[in-house]
Image (cartoon, rainbow, N blue to C red):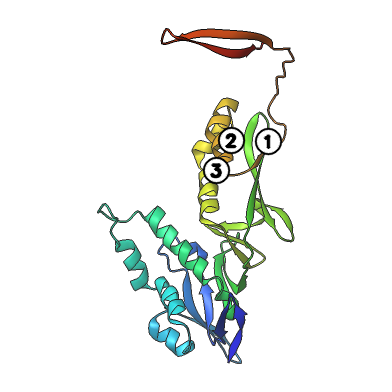
Amino acid sequence: MYLPFINGIYLPCIDMILLFSPEKLLKDGMILHSFEINKTATSISYEVKELSKGELQKKIPMLAKDTSNLLQVFTQTGISKIKNQPQKQGGSIDFDTVFIRKIHDTIAHLMPFFPSTKCYHRITESSRKIKTAACSFSAQKPVLRFKVTKSNDHLQIFISVQLPEGIYPLNEFNRYHFFLEKNSGYLLLGYRDFRTLEWLESLEIKQSGRREPDFIKHVLLRLEETYKVDRNDVFDKNLINCDPRRQLMVSELSGSFLLLTPQWIYD
């Protein structure tokens, strides 16, 4: 039996639950597992298994090979291959760049697959308790919006997330690296947006807000190279009204020609 088209591909009905653990991304990269819930009249237990080739063939026998290979990235073997992959120039791989980018790319390719299976997530709540509950992944692409704010002479960037149904402050979401979570629903940030948020949350950038020239040079102008930023009338504007004075600059070229250059002088 098959589900309807998703991105032009038929997906088989799936007798498997995925367990998503976003907090493990930087720990070991093992953020996806096969998950079984065993209920009896008196108890409930969970069984977590690696997304091995055998497990996938058992639970999803008609799964496309490309999707199977993507899911197997989140096994000990798959993660080891990424970590041990040499750079083009030689040497070990940079965990914080190439590794994270590979995981992001893999998840991005898996996004059309997630609606075809049940998903649970395991996260740490504010009370430090571990929560395991049903979750979902949205195909919506969040758009970041930036606005300059000023409080107690400290400049900072206020960030919002634009979705088809509205605009929400970023702090209404729980961010797990390049995942945004709200009400057990997950959105995937673009990789550039993820790196931008990491940069804006760095201590160096936060400290730049103490001095306006540093903030403009190191934060605002750099951010405006890629994004539209609402300056929010935070910065003082010095307007000078004056009439320009016209003049003509005359210079000689090669002893044979005169070059006439009009100029306007402002006070």
Alpha carbons under labels 1 and 3: distance apart: 16 Å
Residue type of the residue flagged with mark 1: Arg
The relative height of residue 235 versus residue 46 in the rendered view (above or below) is above
Q: Residues within 10 Å of mark 2 (few under 14, many from 20)?
A: many
Q: Measured from the top left, where is residue 112 in percent x and y?
A: 56, 73
Secondary structure found at label 2: helix
Q: Residues within 10 Å of mark 1 (few under 14, many from 20)?
A: few
From the image, tell me which residue sits under label 2. 220
Q: Which of the 4 quarters of the picture holds residue 41?
A: bottom right
Point 62% across, 61% down: residue: 141
Q: Which mark is residue 200?
A: 3
Q: Which of the 4 quarters of the picture holds residue 102?
A: bottom left
Toward the viewer: 96 or 144? 144
For the residues labelled 2 and 1, say whether their Cβ atoms are less than 8 Å apart: yes
From the image, tell me which residue sits under label 1. 231
Residue type of the residue flagged with mark 2: Leu
Point 48% across, 80% down: residue: 34
Secondary structure found at label 3: helix
